[in-house]
Image (cartoon, rainbow, N blue to C red):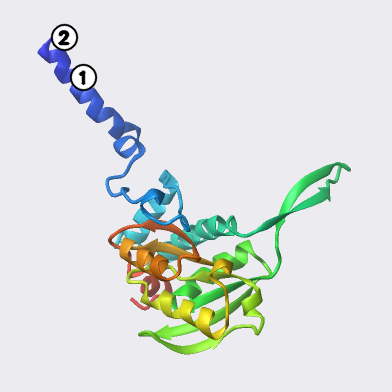
Amino acid sequence: MTSVENNIDHLVNNITPQINGTNGGKYDDDDDDDDQFPENVHIMKTNNQLRELHTLLRDRTTCRSDFKFYADRLIRLTVEAALDQLPYVPCDVTTPTGHCFPGLRHEKGTLCVSLMRSGEAMEKGIRECCRSIRIGKILINEGHVIYAKLPSDVHKRRLLVAYPVITTGSTVLTGLEVLLKEYQCKQSNMILISLFSTPDGINHICDLYPGLTIVVSEINTVAPNHFGQKYFGTD
């Protein structure tokens, strides 16, 4: 093979993946995968749609109305992924044509716990996926619980704990401590739903609460900490 042919092969091998989609489907900072974190951490599989949402929510030129629209899309996708971690039971139904369909339904009694204020951004997406779900609230400020309103039977329920961005994990840890110690909830009954997390934040939570299930759309060393302020228009 001539030197010219070698150069052509080199160009083709390097250009083709970029044409087909960013490094052959892999992103430069997508080194964090499920294998690097405990089994209780479920990271949503990256695809072009998810990557675009992550991009638009980080872009400082995205206006607030567009930001809310894209955030709500990402929230719903993440909530849908979290719902897959709930227990389901067999359920046979009869179709309009009279056929029996062996399906599934999730066990009733799930409760959403919103860690205010940022967690409130996720309530709309949760209600859209679970129409009749009850929502409890815990307001945390600088590591202190200011307000908590939860049903008396919270310890008997499956919990979806909502908080969009985890950096150090301090707010989430405070909320979990309230649920576990003051309300006697079980780690095994809780699913933490987050859009973004840093590796340190997710590992800190897992070290303290290894029985907790976590669903997150992305783990990255740089989290979009402006999320709550821009979503609520207080930036």
Work out which residue is located at the far top of the displayed protein and give it.
1
Q: In the figure, 235 relative to 195: above or below? A: below
Q: In the figure, 183 relative to 49: above or below? A: below
Instruction: Name the spot of residue 105 as percent of width and height, x first.
Output: 72, 56
- The residue at 33%/41% (across/down) is 26
Instruction: Name the spot of residue 98 as percent of width and height, x first.
Output: 89, 43
Instruction: Name the spot of residue 68 as percent of width and height, x first.
Output: 45, 65
Q: Quadrant of residue 7?
A: top left
Work out which residue is located at the far left of the displayed protein and give it.
3
Mark 2 lies on residue: 1
Residue 116 appears in the rendering: no
- The residue at 45%/62% (across/down) is 71
Instruction: Name the spot of residue 134 as percent of width and height, x first.
Output: 64, 75
- The residue at 16%/16% (across/down) is 6
Looking at the picture, which amino acid does disc 1 mark?
Asp
Q: Quadrant of residue 235?
A: bottom left
Looking at the picture, which amino acid does disc 2 mark?
Met
Q: Please give the count of numbered marks on the rendered protein.
A: 2
Give me the disc on residue 69.
none
- Between residue 67 and residue 26, name the one nearer to us: 26
SS state under label 1? helix
Q: CA distance from mark 1 to mark 2?
A: 10 Å
Work out which residue is located at the far right of the displayed protein and give it.
98
- For residue 69, side relative to residue 134 (left or right): left
Tag 1–tag 2 contact (CB < 8 Å): yes
Mark 1 lies on residue: 9
Category of crowding for the residue at label 2, using alpha-carbon neighbours closer than 10 angstroms: few (below 14), some (14–19), many (at least 20): few
Q: In the figure, 50 relative to 126: above or below? A: above
- The residue at 46%/52% (across/down) is 44
Considering only order in the chain, which callout, 2 or 1, is on the residue closer to the N terminus? 2
Q: Quadrant of the N terminus?
A: top left
